[in-house]
């Protein structure tokens, strides 16, 4: 364009400036994220001080001072308490967890028969993992195997009395195994029953609707402890004279009923969020009620409430610990049972056992919540408003 | 003609098969459900009466007036083992409410702090609060209760070596012992003065708002109200000659004597439920505050509202609308979870109720009573919430 040179226009480019300090360097990061305002400075100092106060003690207790191997209480008790540790010793008693680990997992299940429980656990992993990975095919077959075939097979495998397997009564079941069975059955039952209850609550049939509302609200209005207690005390009364119902089954029924009511409310939330046009569109295409529900409404509704469903599952998994109150030995209760065992009774045993139980519960629940977040992203088709 | 030929099969079909008539089907299914339900209830009632007759259990609520014969460790009202079952259940109910009310207050405060903390721009604070929430949300409440009860409180020293805190408080494995308050004559003035103070403060506030509307002049409403509510009782208290003395706990050879004591069962349950529920409340508060559109804050800032007032007058009222419903269900959860006290022997409703049941064997009556009480709490709360929600709902024009 212009051929003549303007003395006030530069010819060469200016070298790019370095990014602002606050965006690049470590000190910049600290300044914006830790020391932005005077209030932040104070908060950071308080936080660091309390961490410095608490963390060394916790790490010491958990790892450095902890006693890792041993066969009885002497490794976890101080000299005064009849052990070998120096006075004033405080540390985790992991030797206790190591010694009783098998019991924590299987309860009083006969030792030579435990391969059966392990086989059931192995089958669970084999069937569950492919179901959880979205890419893998044969989802329908997989689900049928896991939720219909697997429970029957594993019941006979664990209970025995068939194919020459020794009979193992349910009072002998315990530990992690009971926690997982209760959660699995609770999840497998509460999901379909919850869907039916939610559909019933939104149905036009007065009788059905009232029935579902009363069931859901009564169960949600009372604590789980109360539901379990009712299942324990009232179920035997409800049955004809001479019939009896297994204690374990009572707990399973109680947990399943409780979870179903909560699940129903979560799914109802999803159903309410689906625009009316979806159902009407299906109607106008001539789909029957069940076709409409199964193919149009439910897939959208359930996708919407995945976080709520998984939260119910997490709640269910945590709530299985309450069966301790009706005298069953799930993971938490069997650990607690050992607190009074003379072989391991020390001041440090309860805390160690509870921290261990907490870690196991935490891993399962945190895993579930992470998976639900992943699934939400995976199923997100961008239609969300 | 053609018209007829089309209509004819249609009418024929409708008259032949009722199965395809939605109305008929609906009535059929409902009648079927009712029949099954009635049959089920009848057979259950029959079985229950047969089973009860066989085990020679008395029926009716007469047992409530009988002597209970068991002791209760902690009670808000006078209770001995000579008291009636009815009173035992009342003690349990009051204990449940005590845990619920104290727990709800603490959980709300802690939850609010943690929830705000997670939103903080300070990386360290936000991360610490996240860790808190993720830890407590993913472990069972029963485990937290046992953690405090058998893990922490049980390894505190014996009463004779109790840890002494400020103001003559002692912490031992028998719980927290602190000076008991003894109210003298004229102490009635305190509650009266507080009530009067609240009324006066309310009247003052109404007047002050009206004045601001008329003249645009503002008064420090909060400070003046607080001064009235605290100041009036204080003045009354001094005027009556400070009718309050303390019964200090004294360290004996083996035990602490005197003072008031809160048992470790209560402390464990209260701490566990508060801290556990706080994690959930924190998430609710965070979601509520994040749910208020950014435009709201920016618009308020553009109008020149001060940052503190933006939070107080623009963000919080709108966040409340999102926060209140889930918050109530958390409060209800905490109240229901207080039934876990039975696991550590805290005498709440479920605990005293099931003890009564075991002693009398009157399962149907006892379960009816407990169900009714728990359901009443739930229904009362949800009715209140519906009213509150309707009051707070966004008025759209």
Image (cartoon, grey):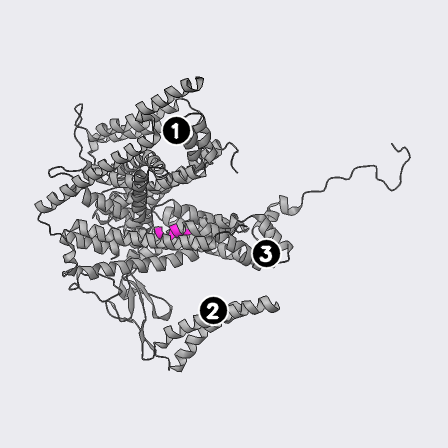
Query: At which x and y percent is residue A111?
Result: 21, 33
Q: Secondary structure at mark 1?
A: helix
How many residues crowd mark 1 within 10 Å: few (<14), some (14–19), many (20+)?
few
Nearer the observer, B92 or B383: B383
Q: Residues within 10 Å of mark 2 (few under 14, many from 20)?
A: some
In screen coordinates, is B297 left or right of A112? right
Tell me the element at label 3.
loop
Residue beneath label 3, please?
A37
Same chain for labels 3 and 1? Say yes or no: yes
Task: Find residue A153 and report its image quarter.
Answer: top left
Q: Residues within 10 Å of mark 3 (few under 14, many from 20)?
A: few
Residue linked to disc 2: B202
Prevailing SS of the magenta stretch:
helix
Do circles 3 and 2 both sit on a common chain? no
Question: Most extreme residue toward the front, as rendered?
Answer: B1
Task: State the separation of the CA atoms marked 3 and 1.
Answer: 55 Å
Please report the bounds of the magenta region as a residue range.
Answer: B327-332
Q: Residue furthest right?
A: A4
Relative to B210, does residue A173 appear above or below in the rendering?
Answer: above
């Amino acid at each position: 364009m212009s051929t003549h040179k303007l003395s006030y226009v530069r010819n060469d480019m200016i070298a790019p400036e370095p990014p602002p300090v606050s965006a690049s360097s470590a000190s910049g990061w600290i300044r914006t994220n830790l020391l932005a305002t005077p209030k932040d400075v104070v908060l950071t100092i308080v936080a660091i001080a309390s961490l410095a106060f608490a963390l060394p003690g916790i790490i010491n207790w958990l790892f450095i001072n902890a006693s890792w191997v041993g066969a009885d209480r002497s490794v976890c008790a101080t000299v005064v308490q009849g052990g070998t540790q120096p006075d004033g010793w405080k540390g985790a008693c992991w030797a206790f967890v190591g010694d009783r680990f098998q019991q924590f997992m299987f309860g009083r299940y006969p030792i030579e028969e435990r391969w059966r429980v392990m086989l059931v656990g192995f089958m669970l992993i084999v069937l569950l993992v492919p179901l959880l990975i979205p890419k893998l095919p044969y989802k329908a077959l997989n689900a049928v195997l896991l939720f219909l075939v697997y429970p029957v097979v594993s019941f006979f495998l664990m209970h025995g009395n068939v194919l020459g397997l020794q009979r193992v009564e349910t009072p002998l079941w315990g530990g992690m195994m009971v926690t997982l069975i209760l959660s699995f059955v609770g999840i497998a039952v509460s999901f379909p029953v919850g869907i039916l209850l939610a559909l019933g609550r939104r149905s036009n049939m007065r009788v059905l609707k009232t029935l579902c509302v009363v069931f859901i609200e009564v169960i949600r209005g009372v604590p789980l402890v109360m539901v379990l207690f009712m299942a324990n005390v009232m179920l035997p009364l409800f049955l004809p004279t001479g019939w009896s119902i297994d204690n374990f089954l009572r707990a399973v029924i109680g947990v399943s009923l409780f979870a179903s009511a909560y699940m129903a409310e979560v799914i109802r939330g999803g159903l309410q969020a689906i625009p009316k046009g979806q159902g009407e569109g299906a109607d106008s295409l001539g789909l029957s009620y069940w076709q409409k529900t199964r193919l149009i409404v439910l897939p959208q509704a359930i996708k919407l409430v995945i976080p709520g469903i998984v939260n119910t599952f997490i709640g269910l998994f945590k709530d299985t610990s309450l069966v301790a109150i009706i005298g069953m030995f799930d993971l938490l209760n069997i650990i607690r049972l050992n607190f009074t065992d003379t072989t391991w009774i020390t001041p440090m045993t309860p805390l160690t056992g509870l921290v261990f139980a907490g870690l196991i519960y935490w891993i399962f629940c945190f895993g579930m919540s992470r998976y639900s977040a992943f699934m939400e992203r995976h199923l997100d088709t961008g239609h969300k408003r | 003609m053609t018209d007829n030929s089309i209509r004819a099969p249609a009418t024929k079909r409708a008259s032949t098969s009722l199965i395809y008539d939605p109305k008929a089907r609906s009535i059929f299914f409902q009648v079927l459900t009712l029949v099954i339900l009635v049959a089920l209830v009848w057979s259950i009632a029959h079985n229950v009466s047969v089973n009860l007759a066989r085990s020679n259990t008395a029926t009716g609520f007469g047992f409530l007036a009988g002597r209970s014969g068991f002791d209760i460790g902690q009670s808000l009202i006078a209770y001995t083992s000579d008291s009636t079952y009815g009173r035992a259940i009342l003690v349990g109910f009051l204990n449940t409410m005590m845990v619920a009310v104290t727990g709800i207050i603490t959980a709300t405060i802690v939850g609010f702090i943690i929830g705000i903390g997670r939103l903080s721009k300070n990386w360290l604070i936000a991360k610490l609060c996240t860790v808190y929430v993720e830890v407590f949300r993913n472990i069972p409440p029963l485990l937290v209760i046992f953690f405090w009860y058998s893990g922490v409180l049980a390894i505190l020293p014996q009463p004779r070596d109790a840890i002494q805190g400020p103001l003559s408080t002692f912490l031992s494995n028998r719980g927290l012992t602190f000076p008991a308050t003894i109210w003298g004559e004229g102490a009635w003035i305190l509650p009266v003065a507080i009530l009067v103070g609240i009324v006066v403060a309310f009247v003052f506030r109404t007047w002050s708002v009206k004045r601001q509307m008329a003249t645009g002049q503002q008064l420090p409403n909060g400070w003046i109200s607080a001064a009235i509510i605290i100041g009036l009782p204080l003045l009354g208290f001094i005027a009556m000659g400070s009718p309050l003395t303390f019964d200090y706990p004294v360290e004996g050879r083996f035990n602490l004597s005197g003072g008031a004591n809160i048992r470790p069962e209560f402390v464990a349950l209260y701490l566990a439920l508060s801290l556990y529920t706080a994690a959930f409340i924190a998430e609710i508060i965070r979601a509520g505050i994040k749910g208020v559109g950014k435009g709201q804050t920016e618009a308020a800032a553009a109008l020149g509202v001060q940052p503190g007032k933006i939070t107080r007058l623009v963000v919080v009222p709108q966040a409340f609308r999102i926060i209140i419903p889930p918050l109530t269900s958390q409060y209800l959860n905490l109240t229901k979870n207080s039934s876990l006290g039975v696991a550590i022997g805290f005498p709440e409703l479920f605990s005293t109720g099931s003890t009564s049941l075991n002693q009398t064997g009157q399962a149907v009556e006892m379960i009816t009573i407990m169900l009714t009480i728990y359901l009443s709490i739930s229904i009362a709360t949800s009715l209140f919430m519906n009213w509150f929600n309707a009051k707070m709902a966004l008025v759209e024009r």
